[in-house]
Amino acid sequence: MIEEPYRWVEAIANRREYIEAQLAPGSPIAALGYRDGILFLTLSQTRQKIFEIYDRIALGAIGHPGDIERLRMAAIELASTEGFTRSAADVSLRRLVHYSLSPVMKSAFEQVYGPPYLARMLFAEVGGRPEEDLFLRVEYDGEIATNGATYAQAPQDFAVLSGTRRSRELMEAFLKDQHAPDATFQTTLNSALDAWSIGHMSLQAGDTSELPERAALLRYRREKLSNSGIEAALIERDSSRAIRYHSLSDTELRSLIHD
């Protein structure tokens, strides 16, 4: 009897270690709020990582494609049901994550004899003004992290997702210093590419402890852009738009990239 709680804790620790190892190679994702909306961006060669959920809400995710798809469909169904029974304006990202997705992921993680979700997700909900944008990162164990919003500090105007904690922290440190909510789309795009490059460099180097020099960052960014495609999407801030989520093509974005 005494050994049972210990075995459960040990099993949870082993499960966490396994999931972290599976998620570690995931290509980073940056979501930046700016004056006209929220930009999601990543670089990839294979499967899609950025999705529309509902009207003002979008999702970026890394992990197993099957698990991401299951969670994406659950989020869409929940948001659509809420919008149908009430109104589109009543669909809330906080409600969607806190009362639906997070409990499901927490339960799956703690049931040690069942499969967990191999997924790490980043949600964003565009507001009427940049300071009203909401970003929520949801971990495989159901843990939720907001975009820095606490009683003691204002929310950040960006959020990122990566395979390791250190990679994510370096991306956040860069954007905290370099990104501004009143930036233009072109400036925001280039900041997102820089943040992605910093996160990916950290993953490739085994979680480096410092931000790279500007010259090294640009060399790495050019190298990755030469053999990877840009996946990006925009949630527009203008509420008069019938459709506010737009996928952006690699071709139209490359002309806006500068060193």
Image: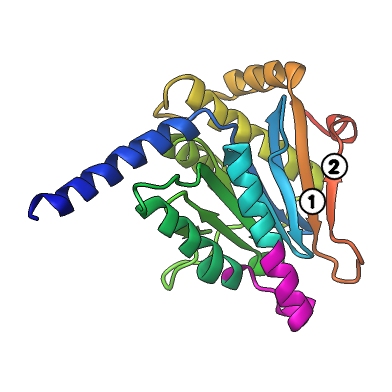
Point out which mark residue 166 bears.
Answer: none
Residue hosting label 2: 248
| Observer-nearest of 191 and 243 | 243
Residue hosting label 1: 234
Q: Furthest-left residue in view?
A: 2
| Observer-nearest of 193 and 259 | 193
| Magenta portion: prevailing SS class | helix
The residue sitting at 15% across, 49% down in the picture is 6
Q: Which amino acid does label 2 sit on?
A: Leu
- Is 78 displayed left or right of 170 in the figure? right
Q: Can residue 158 be seen in this view?
A: no
Q: Is residue 56 visible?
A: yes
Against 162, is 242 above or below?
A: below
- Asked if residue 1 lies in the magenta stretch, the reply is no
Q: What distance separates the C-alpha of mark 2 from that of mark 1?
A: 7 Å
| Observer-nearest of 5 and 102 | 5
- Is 21 displayed left or right of 257 in the figure? left
On the rendered image, what quadrant is the N terminus found in?
A: bottom left
Q: Where is residue 156 in the image (x, y as percent from the top left)?
A: 56, 58
Specify the segment rendered in magenta. 77-94
Q: Position of residue 220 (x, y in %)?
A: 63, 19
Give the mark, 2 or 1, whose residue is nearer the N terminus. 1
Q: Residues within 10 Å of mark 1 (few under 14, many from 20)?
A: many
The residue sitting at 80% across, 64% down in the picture is 237
- Is 238 displayed left or right of 181 in the figure? right
Tell me the quarter of the picture where residue 133 sits.
bottom right
Figure label count: 2
- Is 40 displayed left or right of 117 in the figure? right
Residues marked 2 and 1 touching at CB (< 8 Å): yes
Q: Which amino acid does label 1 sit on?
A: Leu
Q: Furthest-bottom residue in view?
A: 86
Against 121, is 167 above or below?
A: above
